[in-house]
Image (tube, coloured by chain):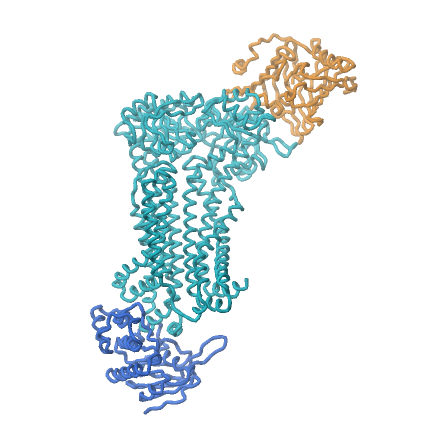
Chain colours: A orange, B cyan, C blue
Amino acid sequence: MNKAMLIVLCAAPLLAQDARQIVEESQRRGRANSQRYEGVLEVVGADTRVTKKSWQSWRLGSYGNSKAVIRFTAPAEVKGVALLVINHPDRSSDQWMWTPAIARDRRIALQDRSTRFFGTDFSFEDLEERDAEQYDYKLTGEEAIAGAACWRIEARPRQNKTSQYTLSRVWIRKDNYVPAQYENFIKDQPVRRLEQKDIQNIQGIWTPRTLEMTDLRRKSRTILRMEKLEYNVPLKEDEFTVQALRRDQ
Amino acid sequence: MILLRLISWPYMRKHLLRSVLTTAGIVLGVALLVGMQTANRSVLSAFNQTVERIAGKAQLQVSAGDPGFGEEILERVQSLPGIRAAAPVIEAEADPGFPGQGKLLILAVDMTGDRSLRDYEFDNGDQDVIDDPLIFLAQPDSIILTREFAARNHIVSGSKITFDTMQGRKQFTVRGILKAGGMAQAFGGNLGIMDIYAAQSVFGRGRHFDRIDIGLNEGVTLEQGEAALRKLLGPGFTVEPPSGRGRHFESLLGVYTLAMTVSSVFALFIGMFIIYNSFAIAVTQRRGEIGILRALGATRRQVRVLFLAESAIAGLIGSCAGAGLGLIFARTLTGVSADMLESMFGVAQNVQQVVIDRAFLFFAVVLGTGTSMLAALIPARNAARVEPIQALQKGRYQVLGAGENRLRRNLALCAAALSLACLPLSANRVFFFAGFLLTLLAALLLTPFLALELTRLLRRPLKWLRPVEGALAADSLLQAPRRTSATVAALMLSLALVIGQGGVARASLSSIEEWMNNSLNPDLFVSTTENIASHGVRFPASMQQELENVEGIAEVQAARLPRIDFHGYPVMLVSIQMESVGRRIKRHMVAGDEATMNRLAAQGKGVIFSENLAALVKMKLGDMVDLPATTGTMQLPIVGIVRDLSNQMGTIFIDRQVYIRYFQDDTVDVFRIYLKPNISPETTRGRIVDRMGNGRRMFVLLNRDLRDYISRVMEQWFGLTYVQVIVAMLVAILGIVNTLTVSISDRRRELGVLRAVGGLRWQIRRSVWLEAAAIGIIGLVLGVATGAVLLYYELQAIQHDISGMPFAYEFPWGIALLLLPVILAAALGASIFPAERAVRGSLVEALEYE
Amino acid sequence: MISLRAVTKLYQGKRQIAALQGVDLEIARGEMVSIVGPSGSGKSTLLNLIGGLDRATSGEIRIDGQALTALSDDDLTRLRRDKIGFIFQFFNLLPSLTCVENVALPLHLKGLPRQEIDTRARSLLEMVQLGQRLDHLPDELSGGERQRVAIARALAFSPPVLLADEPTGNLDTHTGADILALIRDLHQRLNSTVLIVTHDASVAESCQRTVTLRDSRIVGDVRR
């Protein structure tokens, strides 16, 4: 849920061929060598029941080539559970999960990315970064989101089946190129909406500190607040391996 | 049809008891048939339903029998193009110990990926099934139960349940409730869902899966997917649609069904004789009436149709009643079948409902009605032959024509000769079964003749016993051979069946006895279950060392007993330390030299086959065996064939090291323990339990316990024989009551004279009873003789067609002797009602000339 | 010997039919009485009641001082066996038994020693001049011979009362006369009380006393 992970699609000026440029500019501006934050997650179910979790997140690299580790810190039952995501520019990411209670890591299979990420309103796919090359973009208008002027861009996956979504809409702010909102569609039916709020400049990068994902079918939402966010922290490649997952429990 | 109402209905009403008894044969036959079939179908359908519901959207399933396969297979399968989803599965059973609730089927899956194949959420948009999926995965004590099971046992989310695991008895937390419908109906709702990686440790599966459920990409056909997977995985794996499991189960069920079907067909067959008898009698009694009908212008055809219609109606009513009764039977039988399957094959079933197959019910009713009509065919023809003039004649027409008798006898002799001729050719199954049927035919054709001769023989002792009552009883039978012989035939068949089944039971019992004495000689067994047949949980290999360290233990053999598919048979693979077994067990050798066999097997240079498997798959000493394993095909020669009864479908013994190498499975189902001399097994059992039993699911059985258990299972199986004894008794009673009812009406005058000249009531009753007893004894003698032959054919069929077990022919004298008092008692019971009628009727009327 | 007081026998059907109505009759020991009357007048019913084959609806019957109404079924049977001999119009022999076996029937039923039964049955048959036909089946005999066997059977226990229901009804005149002669002879020799139901006038006339029945009542009682 780190911001960069969620940037699937972005955009640049006016005409159809410019949509891609807007997305690429947005990705470029958000780029950092590494990132770290402590996340607080709230899931508000349709019955307004709220569950809370906290985790720490580390990311190395950006966009297509990044690697990320999430390690849960609360509640007690899930403390130590870790997730490793290795993104590839040309294909879907590889994901592993570590559960300390049975001392096992497991691979999360490719076919299953459309499922929800551990009871949140994010799917596993929503955690991935995809290279802009995997999509076709089209600028379809301009709209204001939360008072800020935005380009509205439509993105369609080039290859079938690599995404659960058949269409995504993204609103990119004209002032700082930060995506303010996404809407993901399955067969012309909006299924998830992500709002990126509380945008602050951290180490020169405009970063949304609060992400709110709404599952439009389940009518539940998940709010992620990122605290102690830092860019370009010293991280090593070998901290982003399955072995490291096991080691650092 | 007006004739039916005018002619048949009053007759039926007048002879209500007999009409009821007549139909009772059909009722019983149809009831048994419907009961057994419905029970089996219910078990099968419960199984299929479980498989289907659990399979979800899976189109193919990859499995490798009991041993399972390593996790790396999953990635290989997932990497195959054309595969949309591949989800690993472990299935196990657990007993949460709720009284009367039975076991839980644990379906262990990887929740992160499983939803692409199985629906865990229903009523979209509603609350989650799992309270918190992350906690579910993070905590290995998580389990999801169905709403139904939870409600039955007052479980809510957050409740704890306990069951035995490889690490001992453990508490599990209910972290989700599955909504009703869909998957939640599998295994009668007794379904628990766990995380697969947690299940691996809980059930001792190491890094193995039992199965991978596969969904294919659109555009990939089942055949293409299957072929690709087979090519990828090799022969050690089974790749088939979920329905394939149902087929395997059905074939297991088949062995058991066979005996049941034979019984019900016999019952129907016997019912046919009872009906034939009744109609033959009715035709005789209603001769006058038929004559008048004919004189009034009824055609022969009309008369024949009248009788056939009567039989059809009787058959229809009987069949419908039988079908209803059968469905009631089925409720009881379903539980029995399910229990037996579990104890024999370790396939637990939770059958919640009886499945009614309308088509089969219809078939059973048609069969029952058809049988009834078939039985009435000859009497109806005889009725049609009645000349109008005979309406005015009175008297008995029961004497068998000499010609008819001779014809029968000659036919019988031909049949017997042919069946003998079939004997040397019986290697060919066609000749074998032809011989069997010819023997039965000969027995049936000879019945009237033999019954008559036996009665003549019996008259003397009967007369000696009771000069008046005995002689008259015998005379009554002699005077009406037609009345007697059909009942005798029915009795003969049912008793032959009892003798046959009893003989099979006895033969298998004595074989099992011998085998238990030879092979089951360890002092103690340590098993994960109270029996050795079913295994959900397994022991880790490390336990062997622990056991060897227990004081007083001389030797420990670790056995893993997976069931594998070999040439289409569910064979038991016994992997055990062959060197130790060779030293400890004296084998009953069928082929090969014991010392050489033990040496080669211990060196891992060969496998040992059980005699029955060798017979079933037609393999002999020295033949190469290709055993498909998960790491490739294992090729070893047969170095010995031994008699072994561990498994009905056959056993293959291999050395434990070879097994571990090929199947990468070092878990253990049973430890066989030999003690040092003069060490008490009870004491050692205590020590083992003290040292290792803390919380571990473990049963330490004394040799005696295991034997008792095996005997109990056998008894359950042979309980069938007792069911048949009861059916035989019912048939005996039905047939005899029927015959006696007619007999006393035929003998009304005679009995009247007896009473007039001073016969007391008990003397009259005794005469009736002696007649019943005579029928019973004749039926018994013929039945025992036919049974002796039947037994031969049954044993042959078992050896060659069913399980390959070569049983020695041993006549079940015990059962034959038991039958004598049973039949005499049945005769007594059957004679009560007719005898009362005989002593109650008006003397004056009885003495009047009819 | 035989005494009837106000004996009535009703048959229950759709309509009640009276077979006997208020019959009084006394027969002394050693009498030979014929009972005559048209068909349906109640002759056979009277005989059956006296012989204990049937029970009266009301009234009292005594044989040798013993009231039949008081007896149980089995006691009635014993009385029949020991004190009454029956001779039927259609003989009522058991077709599957030989002559000697038929005669031995009541003896066996009483449970006498077998040796004695055999001797007695033989001598009974000799008494009716059938000593040469001991082991024949009834079907092999003529009508007269069969009736003789039946008579021999009736005499098994030398009963004080002999009841014959149309004993000659199924025989030709000549044979009938023979049988009648035999009965008279036995009557004299054994001094039994004999009742013969008949509609043969010659039979009736040969008796000391003739009771006439009509419409269920005694309308005549003649001694000669």
Q: Is residue C118 shown above or below B578?
A: below
Image spot of residue B43 (x, y percent): 48, 40
Q: Nearer the viewer, residue B252 or B687?
A: B252
Can residue A32 be seen at all in this image of the molecule?
yes
Front one among C74 and C218: C218
Location of the C terminus of chain B (image quadrant): bottom left
Number of marks: 0
Q: Nearer the viewer, residue C151 or B49?
A: C151
Is A32 left, or right, of B64 in this rendering?
Answer: right
Q: Is residue C77 above or below residue B24?
A: below
Which quadrant, please, contains the N terminus of chain B? bottom right
Q: Quadrant for residue C131, please give it.
A: bottom left
Residue at screen point 23% across, 78% down: C127
The answer to whether any part of residue C82 appears in the image is no
What residue occupies the far bottom of the structure in this picture? C224
The image shows residue B240 at horizontal and vertical percentages of 51, 29
**Residue B655 point in image, percent of width and height:** 35, 24
In the image, residue B585 sits, relative to residue B780, either above or below, namely above
Residue C119 image-quadrant placement: bottom left
Residue B34 located left or right of residue A97: left
* Residue B92 on image: x %, y %: 47, 31
- Name the residue at 41% across, 25% down: B667
